Image (spheres, rainbow, N blue to C red):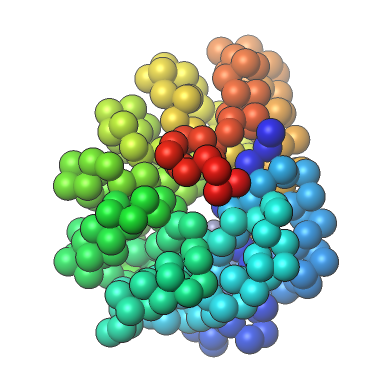
Amino acid sequence: MIVDIHTHFLNFEQHCGNQLRQDMKRCNIEEKQWTYSEEDYLNGTKAADKVIVFGLKATKTGWDVKNEYVADFVSRHSEKYIYFASIDPYQPDFMLDLVYNHKQLKCQGVKLGAIYQGVHPCDKRYYEIYDYCEKNNLPIITHMAATFSSGVPLDYARPFHMDQVACDFPHLKLILAHLGHPWESETLAIIRRQENVYADLSALYYRPWQFYNAMRLAVEYGCCNKILFGSDFPATTTESSIAGIRNLNNLAIKANLPLIPTDLIEGIIGRNTLDLIYPTHKQLF
Ligand SMILES: [Zn+2]
């Protein structure tokens, strides 16, 4: 069972604003990587058995992926794809939007990103979202990592803030994306101690030195069981992510450094994340 818990579905031309385009250009991110068809998306995630998919609503930094666009896709591919709604607390009606996505569009979780949305992760607006999600068993995946988008303090992306959130919402299922790079050590300290907080390792394998060190730290802390598989399509595909993670030890072998045990690597790739984040809702899938 391969569960890819981190993929983006969007139409770049329609959903991405000028500021975002300028930020991508400045950071040498090619627009064509983020310009893809539904067929490309299906091909890019075909190596997974189940896929969590979302857009991103963050008007502060130029992201405006319509939730309906993602929900419509999932309604046509519901045997495999699981819809997460992106809720933007920068918008005044964000709670109405959350209820609409939950009740009408039937989202199975929520995607957030403080560094994109321009709101501190401990702001009372986010706390309203956390409270609703905890009460309604909706897991949250939140971008806690560096980004090319500008205009919001990098502090908002620090995983450290989510430790307080986990203390205040102990039953909320939280996934910190990208192992919180470049603050992987903060993320690992949190997922180790907080029962319902996990991290995904999406979009990391192509920075092999950083990824290797983060995973060695996870081995030493004994928290690889809290790390989940994701690709961050279109940053990379499910298939190339699996291959990249399996190549994790190449660098260590050449440098005669300690290895990441293969059983821990395979444990992450084959983990049934849905059982972890929906412990009482298995019948949904
Ligand atoms: Zn992402």
Q: Is residue 125 above or below residue 220?
A: below
Count every numbered label the image shows and give the total.
0
The foreground one among 134 and 228 is 134
User: Viewed as shown, does residue 97 lie left or right of 1?
Assistant: left
Q: Residue at x 65, y 16 (%)?
A: 262
Q: Residue at x 65, y 23 (%)?
A: 266
The foreground one among 32 and 255 is 32
Answer with the quarter of the image where residue 112 lies.
Answer: bottom left
Q: Is residue 176 above or below residue 110?
A: above
Answer with the quarter of the image where residue 72 lies.
Answer: bottom right
Residue 237 % position (x, y): 73, 51
User: Viewed as shown, does residue 193 lie left or right of 105?
Assistant: left
Q: Quadrant of ligand 1?
A: bottom right
The foreground one among 184 and 63 is 63
Q: Residue at x 77, y 55 (%)?
A: 44
Residue 94 % position (x, y): 32, 77
Residue 125 visible in the displayed image: yes
Residue 243 % position (x, y): 75, 35
Residue 279 % position (x, y): 44, 37
The foreground one among 68 and 27 is 68
Q: Quadrant of the N terminus?
A: top right
Considering every residue shown, the one lying at the far front of the view is 283
Residue 144 visible in the displayed image: no
Q: Residue at x 51, y 80 (%)?
A: 64
Q: Is residue 85 above or below residue 238?
A: below
